[in-house]
Amino acid sequence: MADALPTPPAEGLLDRRRSGIVLHPTSLPGPHGSGDFGPSALHFIDWLAAAGQSLWQVLPLNPIGPGNSPYASVSAFAGSPLLVALEPLCERGWLAIGDTPAFGAEQVDYERVGRWRMTKLREAADAFFADAAAANRRDFDAWCVAHAAWLDDYALFMALDEATRSASGFRAWPHWPAALARREPDALATARQQHRREFDFWRFVQWCFDWQWQALRRHARERGVAIVGDLPIFVAHHSADCWQRPELYQLEADFEPTVVAGVPPDYFSATGQRWGNPLYDWAAMQHDRFRWWIARLRRQLELADALRIDHFRGFAACWEIPAASATAVDGRWVEVPGDDLFTALQREFGHLPLIAEDLGVITDDVVALRRRFGLPGMRILQFAFGGDAHHAYLPHNYDAATCAYTGTHDNDTIAGWWHSAPPRPRAFAAAYLGCGDADVHWAAIRAVSQSVARLAIFPMPDVLGLGSEHRMNTPGEEGCWTWRFTWDQVGPHAAAKLAAISAACGRAPLARLGLPDDA
């Protein structure tokens, strides 16, 4: 379990033509109610390689938060317990799964699945601590020491959160007993002893998450597939991060936020979006030489070969909303020292394998920041047909430093968009793509693949030609993040067709086409 990873990808991971799929592991098939790091994940990597794809982009792997979103986590460092596969725990003798409830194959019922999976993880943890082999205990102990800087506070945070909920229902950490909220050393030491079993359980889950994911990464590297992770810009207020380092956020004396994050009113929303995340105290982070950001990036680059940074424009300026405001209307733009931050990260890591999510209204300073550090931006084909032939999101207008998508997890599927689009954008798309109802998804994939953009990534529902009911997320709506596919939906032909398109467009070896020998 502690084997080293194969040699990392070359520095130019994002600097050559390649393509891939965006799919969160929860969307994978499997018998235990949600996708995870089990056999289906290995099979998916094999499928990617067969399809000529060399990138697997995931959503954040952190624990899910309110609304089951992976973008509102209790930790920027920890991994989601839901992704821990049960089969490897059985193989090590720590778990007997027994009868599995009848979970749905195409949706995740998070409440029911989460409750059952956590019960199984607790059974495995009890068996591990009671009778694990000495080598496994040494692995566990060494891993805990190596990750103690974030792991111990996360495990204690989760133990205290669980104890608080059991006693009086959910209470955000500023409303815990004052000595714990203020992190008084004696109170923390006492709590760690009182909740030792729970503390160790959360460390065990994180260790399992890590060795299972690293095994998948080895499998991917051996097949030429690199992992693209996802880094949300902000953290949740009720999180181990905020509790551990409150001085890095703009908080009142009672630890409640003074201002929160969001975006201003625009064409899509007259009141903007009030996300509610606490905003960073950038002056404190500068004074601390961005050590939290360095630690965060180091951890995420342990889990992925490259990272998509969400809301990149927030590193040039962020929309600061008074915490008392119910909407984003009363916010204001506040400059952020993004240049200093990325200089510090570059000094620490050298080349930064990052993709900048620069969608929406992007100002010149955001473009300059992205270019200064050589980061590719994003273009979404679905957004391209509302204007004319000069629209920046049309493939013939891309530049090479681009990661191009047919759509993202926040968009409708390309087939769903096609069937619901107004007449003019749909007619424009039909003329541009040369397609109809039956082949719009392949025409979109081909157009993005043929572009000069070095990176091309497609949501799995677009490869499968699925409709709106297979959408992953609709921002602002409840009941999202639940979509799963089945291997029956994939069929035998999708991989071959995707491989042929990718090879013809220089994103996979030309040998994939099986061209005849002229001789």
Image (cartoon, rainbow, N blue to C red):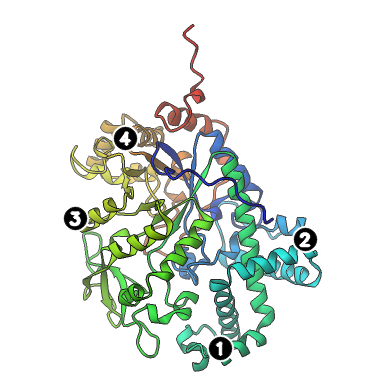
- Distance from disc 1 to disc 4, alpha carbons, whole Å, reads 57 Å
The amino acid at mark 3 is Asp
Q: Kindly identify the residue that appears in the image at 80 percent across and 72 percent down.
A: 130
Query: Badge 3 is on which residue?
Result: 364
Q: Kindly identify the residue that appears in the image at 79 percent across and 65 percent down.
A: 134
Query: Badge 2 is on which residue?
Result: 98
Q: Is residue 491 left or right of residue 409?
A: right
Mark 2 falls on what kind of element? Answer: loop
Indicate the position of residue 42 as horizontal and vertical percent values.
62, 45
- Distance from disc 2 to disc 1, alpha carbons, whole Å, reads 33 Å
In the picture shown, does residue 498 fall above or below 407? above
Query: Which label is found at residue 452?
Result: 4
Q: Residues within 10 Å of mark 3 (few under 14, many from 20)?
A: few
The amino acid at mark 1 is Ser
Indicate the position of residue 203 as horizontal and vertical percent values.
63, 71
* Mark in front: 2 vs 3: 3
- Distance from disc 3 to disc 1, alpha carbons, whole Å, reads 50 Å
Query: Which label is found at residue 432?
Result: none
Indicate the position of residue 456 as horizontal and vertical percent values.
39, 40
Mark found first going from the N terminus, 3 or 1: 1
Between 364 and 438, the one lying in front of the other is 364
Mark 3 falls on what kind of element? Answer: helix
- Distance from disc 4 to disc 3, alpha carbons, whole Å, reads 23 Å
Which quadrant of the view contains residue 158?
bottom right
* Mark in front: 4 vs 2: 4
- Distance from disc 2 to disc 3, alpha carbons, whole Å, reads 58 Å
Q: Residues within 10 Å of mark 1 (few under 14, many from 20)?
A: few
Mark found first going from the N terminus, 4 or 2: 2
Q: Kindly identify the residue that appears in the image at 47 percent across and 31 percent down.
A: 508
Mark found first going from the N terminus, 4 or 3: 3
Between 2 and 67, the one lying in front of the other is 2
In which quadrant is the N terminus drawn? bottom right
